[in-house]
Amino acid sequence: MSSRHGRARRNSDCTAGGSRPAVRASHRPQRADGAEGVEGADQAFVIGVLTSAADFARARAWGISDAPDYERYLADTAELLADALERFETVRARMFHPQDFEEFCLLNGLDPAEPTARDRYLVNPALQTQLLAYQGEEPAGDFVPRLVRARENGLTLCHADLLLDGGLYGGAGECDEDHARWVRAAYQRGGEVFRRMLVGAGAGVYELRLRVDAPGGRLTAAARVLQWEDGVVRINDEDLELVCAVLCAGLALELPGVAVLHGSQGSAASCGEYLPASWAWSSGGQDWAPADRPVRLDGVAAQPGYSLGTVC
């Protein structure tokens, strides 16, 4: 399993200034701002996607699309994304959330019917944690639900970043290197905790559920994981980043938490024999250890897990 350093997103391809690509809006007439994107010097393309028929209906008043229905809108969006993959080095997407957009326009004195308002919303630095790399997936398949989760994940990442005084995605490292090293160390510790959970579980299909009690509300994360016999792990990048960030905040600030890893343990190499498995760990803030009693988290029951200190 690979993990990222917590500040990897700071130099966004879609932010103007310095050595970053210049940003301009692509104004494709009536192709959607759900299907309208922001391009950057032939290097980056950012698109906002409406993720439900209800959101599509709400956004039509702003002239975002002339598609007759949401199905046609998704087809237009798929065509635009396919074209962007051929023309741009990087293609990213995020959920175009009508309420978020309305609030953004209200705060900044913008007319939501103006294309420039949509452009500014798409590249708003505060929302960059909601971006998801697009690699040719079918929007009408799993990609749209992933965009919804990416927005939820992004809100949690912003909360964790705030608790860490900008140590994850803000500018803390540029003005306080000691603080940045402290956050990086906690992030690496969090990634190591997650790695040991997976190594101890062995091959199988699992879901991790994680909760850390933090000021301002709980930090939560969930991730689906597929692990093969040879130790290769499949997990969405955005889910891995969220898990490591929540673990990082909990360890750095010594916040209590609980985690449950559950699913089916086994592999095709063992004649397709799969066994139900569910383990629980808790943290008093400084480290993670097997829970001292059975745990139920988000409706999932689990017994105390194995000691992470015995996992290499």
Image (cartoon, rainbow, N blue to C red):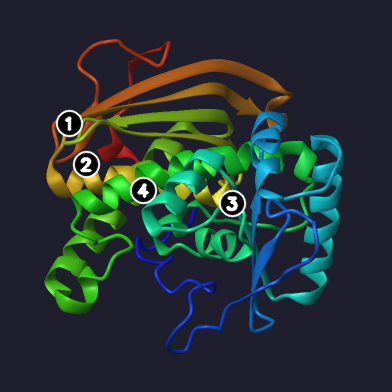
Q: Nearer the viewer, residue 147 or 288?
A: 147
Instruction: Judge whether 18 appears above or below 91 on screen.
Output: below
Residue designated by label 3: 94
Residue at image position (79%, 76%) is 87
Reading the chain from its start, which is encountered first: label 4 or label 2? Answer: 4
Residue designated by label 4: 157
Give coordinates of residue 203: x percent, y percent.
Answer: 57, 34
Q: Nearer the viewer, residue 159 or 72?
A: 72
Reading the chain from its start, which is encountered first: label 1 or label 4? Answer: 4
Q: Amino acid at mark 2?
A: Gly
Q: CA distance from mark 4 to mark 3?
A: 15 Å
Task: Please indicate whether residue 78 sits to the left or right of residue 133 in the image.
Answer: right
Circle 3 packing at 10 Å, graded few (<14), some (14-19), many (20+), is many
Residue at image position (19%, 45%) is 251
| Numbered badge on residue 180 | none
Residue designated by label 1: 256
Q: Amino acid at mark 4?
A: Leu
Reading the chain from its start, which is encountered first: label 4 or label 3? Answer: 3
Q: Amino acid at mark 1?
A: Pro
Q: Amino acid at mark 3?
A: Arg
Instruction: Judge whether 268 appears above or below 39 on screen.
Output: above
Asked which secondary structure carries label 3, the reply is strand
Where, by quadrant of the figure, is residue 209 drawn?
A: top left
Instruction: Judge whether 201 appears above or below 106 on screen.
Output: above
Q: CA distance from mark 4 to mark 2?
A: 13 Å
